[in-house]
Amino acid sequence: MPSNSGQGSKTPETFRVLVVDDSTSIRRRVVQKLETMNFHIAEASSGEEALELTLDQTFDLVVSDIEMGAITGVQLCRVFRRDPGMADVAFVLLTAAKDAKTRFWGRNAGADVYLAKEEMDEKLLPIIEKLMEGRVPRDSTRPQVTGTPLERVSAVLDDHLFDVVVASEVRNLMDHVHDRIEFAERVLELAAEVIGCPYLVLQLLGPGGPTYSIRARGPWPEGDPTAGLAALAIPERSVSATHTTVEADPRFGEGQSVVGGKAHVCEIRVRDETLGTLQIFGGAHDCAELDIQSAKLIASALGIVVKSLFLVEETQLLALTDSLTGLYNRRHAAKRLEEEIARSQRNGTGLCVAMCDVDHFKAINDEFGHSAGDRVLQQIAKSLTEYVRRNDIVARWGGEEFLVIFSEIKLTAARIVAERLRGRLANTPKVEGGPEQITVSVGLAMLGQGITAEMLIEQADQALYRAKARGRNRVEVAGEERRKASTVMRKQAEGN
């Protein structure tokens, strides 16, 4: 049976210590050492007895053997760590085991200190003094706890097995890090299996972000995504960077009016780097504590997997982008142009391309140096990216030339955009160490019947040469001379 020793009843200045060991001699050695520190000490000869003591009282420190009977010191430590009323109790594990497995298991049990018994005489008291420094004795009683010791251990092991299985499922997502959208769908599919909340949102940062993926099981508006995003606190400007999967579930209500309710945000991190968040929304009711804990578990396990996704994206971007400006490179831009032409022909929508060339760029390099020239190119790239529409494509075609692909647009509208863009660039603030003003010449061409990507680029190039020849800092449109000549001839014929 458990026994008590020490200097009378516990005072507010006295810590309560539980010593657990199936060896009477070892237990007595530990108790004798601790008595010199004026602790109130309880003893238990097994893990079962130790847990019985915790049914109606608390402890500030547990010193336990690892290898005991049905309930080991490792299991005992895990029970303490899982119990909200005992999770912060200081825990020291002692072992005489020499095998690597026991030592490994002991070090990873969640204890504050793991100590070999052969070092106990020399190190135990200094370790405990340091461990208890700054702590305040707890109340001696605790709310009633139900369940036998074995039932409590079983519950802890079930919880631990659940954590291990979920973490394993998260690691399996490594197979999908080649595609951000598919990866996000898989994450939320897994999360939906263990989290009973109507709305789950995965935000990913990194090279391909920020993007948002939503799994909506509650009401969701059809045809008006911004209303749903607003209810989940997702910026309206992120519509094009948001992927939504709607999985109607009557348990969470019906209709189109989204009630996000209270959000619980779990950061996805690797060391000090934030990679994104997993957010769960309770809707009309708050999320259950188990759902919050499951979300935290998934977010914690996601760190290394999301980091792998970002590394894949960085590698892909290196192959697709220009290192100086961050824009698509010529090779990828040519591929995207082929795709956009095919889509335009399939959908019967307009397509235009603009070839933009920095005026007097050689003179800029000669007068201000190549570093200033690089800054000019970076400023042009930044202005182009900020000004064009989200679905337009901007690329560095080579040297000081930039290509803009305007999708789903008529020539008249494309010319207006190109003129505004030229004017914006002419009013760009001075680049540090560079010229007072930067201007560009623009050649614009429209996709026509039977026109290939190569032909379209050639037409834009010819228009660009004409803009250069006519004084620079202007927009010229491919085929405009022919159209003007045709108009003149038609009017002459009509006059005759």
Image (cartoon, grey):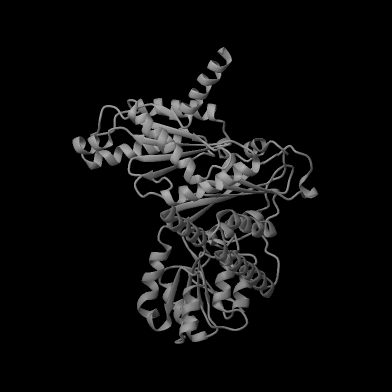
* Quarter in which the C terminus is drawn: top right
Count of numbered marks:
0
**Identity of the residue drawn at 69% across and 36% down:** 224
Vertical position of residue 425 compared to residue 268: above or below: above
Which residue, as the protein is rendered here, is positioned at the far front? Answer: 496
Which residue, as the protein is rendered here, is positioned at the far left? Answer: 367
Picture coordinates of residue 414, whole percent (x, y): 51, 30
Q: Is residue 452 visible?
A: yes
Which residue, as the protein is rendered here, is positioned at the far top? Answer: 495
Q: Nearer the viewer, residue 461 or 481?
A: 481
Q: Is residue 74 left or right of residue 369?
A: right
Q: Nearer the viewer, residue 475 or 122?
A: 475
* Quarter in which the N terminus is drawn: bottom right
Picture coordinates of residue 183, whole percent (x, y): 58, 58
Picture coordinates of residue 405, whole percent (x, y): 49, 39
Q: Is residue 135 visible?
A: no
**Identity of the residue drawn at 71% across and 37% down:** 223
Vertical position of residue 270 compared to residue 416: above or below: below
Picture coordinates of residue 477, whole percent (x, y): 46, 30
Q: Name the image quarter holding residue 347.
A: top right
Q: Name the image quarter holding residue 263.
A: top right
Q: Is residue 160 left or right of residue 24?
A: right
Q: Is residue 269 left or right of residue 56?
A: left
Vertical position of residue 118 compared to residue 228: above or below: below
